[in-house]
Amino acid sequence: MQDRRGFLKLGAGAALGGLASTMPGTVMASECGEIKWDESADVIVVGSGFAGLSAALNVKRSGVGSVLVLEKMQVIGGNSAINGGWLAIPKNPTQLAQGVNDDSPEELVKDQIISGRGMQNEAALRQIANRALDAYELCIETGVKFRKDFNIQVGGHNKARAIRTQHGTGGDITTKLYEAGLKEGVDYRLQHYIEDFVMDGQKIIGLKVRKNYRFPDLKTGSTVFIKANKGVVLANGGFARNMKLREVVDPSLDPTLDCTNALGATGEVTLTAMAHGALPVHMNLIQTGHWGSPDEGGFGWSNALLSIGWHQGVAMSVLNGKRFMNERADRKTCSEAIMKNRNADGSPAYPVVFFNYDNYAKDDRVVRALRDKMAWKVDSLDEIATKFDIPASELKRSVVEYNKHVKARKDPLFNRKMDTAEELTGPFVVSRIWPKVHYCMGGLKTDLGARVLDGRSMEPIKNLYAIGEVTGGVHGEARLSSTSCLECLTMGIVVSETIKSDVQA
């Protein structure tokens, strides 16, 4: 089957100049003759994380036709499958059972406005928060299990509203969404790399795809053209693993920082969309996760372990044995405080976080951390001081002072909320911390219906949609913990409604 115009433009990557050249595989300006489509689908979803899987399932259920999911890697799930499985849901059943009755979507938005530091899109945040229970019901209905009686207050939130999956990984969600989609007729393809968009003017009508691609070798596989009859949904995530692009958009970001993302988080589809006129926003805002550990690579278990450490324990500088931050502040605040801990030569002086061992000896977060040697069981403060080269007398003084603040339930030093803090008596679980590059706040600008905006006309590019981390301008300068999964799942619902509305228009 051939397209109706017979002569279409491919690429436009040259319009990005040096920026596009930082991304191997971004198709540069070229022209082609008649397009012979190898196959077609009504809606093509690019990416198979929370956003892509939610969109695929919900679009399929909307009745607009066939749905094809293209994933460039060899497994389903992307970053979502390896994340911590946290989900912020105001008025979730566990929260209500705990007696937290004064939460609401608007309360969540208030917290996000503070975290966003004036750069957030309040309308988008409000839309997401108002659909939070829809996202929760999607999980429950597809078989996702959450930890029984688990609902806590995480950094930057003013209420306990964060639930967590049964096994503490996003894979608990991606697996169930994938299985549900499979049963309902969604077509999933692995190792399909997007080489370019096929455009009919300012309307996307298909994709140039390299099938049987083996990351990261762009010489593998072969090219096919897949027609998109009703829409293309970009859900390809962020670009935190693209070092060249990171350096271009934020030269201040420490290039030595580790990254929590899967290796495929390189952002080529985002750049291709920009080459075709899609408007980028906030590309320089790249968030670090303050719960990173220098003693394990990638995402690891530190996120889970420190959900105890930040609440029941304390963070101390190894340089002087003193506290240096509000352990329950938002990611940006904590990351900046942590990275000020430097040795005289500028190298990281990794702070330590510790809490009482006995109360959590059988907790799987502790068991895994000790097993993998990214945390240690230590019997005394003297042993902590010796092991991590901390001034012992100052460390002991700081702990005595901290314990007084715990008893008083007031932190005059950093104004930390002390409702969950425990007096430190030992033995202890101790881990080291250092931020890791975690989340791209920037990406493609969309309207509230997830339609991608053309930077030249400020109007939607017809049939092109984007959801999840590939989008920008939603959270502002910093994103709160447990809100990315929420955004991805809810926007998968929203985009399905938008596509159905656009098809019927």
Image (cartoon, rainbow, N blue to C red):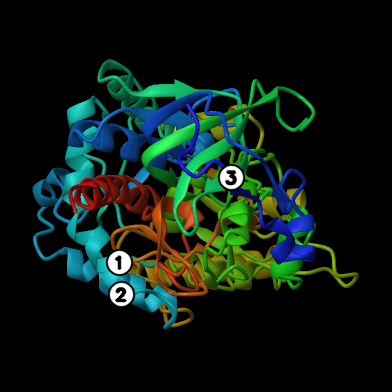
What's the residue type where badge 3 is placed? Answer: Phe
User: What SS does tag 1 mark?
Assistant: helix
Q: For mark 1, what is the residue?
A: 125
Q: Is residue 90 above or below residue 331?
A: above
Point out which mark residue 453 bears. none
Estimate the spatial distance between the alpha carbons at disc 1 and disc 3, rounded to whole Å. 41 Å
Point out which mark residue 122 bears. 2
Residue nearer the viewer, 456 or 139: 456
Mark closest to the chain's N terminus, 1 or 3: 3
Residue 164: image x %, image y %? 33, 40
User: What SS does tag 3 mark?
Assistant: loop
What's the residue type where badge 2 is placed? Answer: Glu
Q: Quadrant of residue 476?
A: bottom left
Q: Residues within 10 Å of mark 1 (few under 14, many from 20)?
A: many
Q: Is residue 74 above or below residue 319?
A: above
Estimate the spatial distance between the alpha carbons at disc 1 and disc 2, rounded to whole Å. 5 Å
Mark closest to the chain's N terminus, 3 or 2: 3
Residue 340: image x %, image y %? 70, 73
Cβ–Cβ below 8 Å for labels 1 and 2? Answer: yes
Residue 294: image x %, image y %? 71, 48
Q: For mark 3, what is the residue?
A: 7
User: What SS does tag 2 mark?
Assistant: helix
What's the residue type where badge 1 is placed? Answer: Leu
Left or right: residue 229 versus residue 348 is left
Residue nearer the viewer, 450 or 63: 63
- The residue drawn where x is 66% and y is 51% is 11
Q: Is residue 322 visible?
A: yes
Q: Is residue 396 above or below residue 139?
A: below
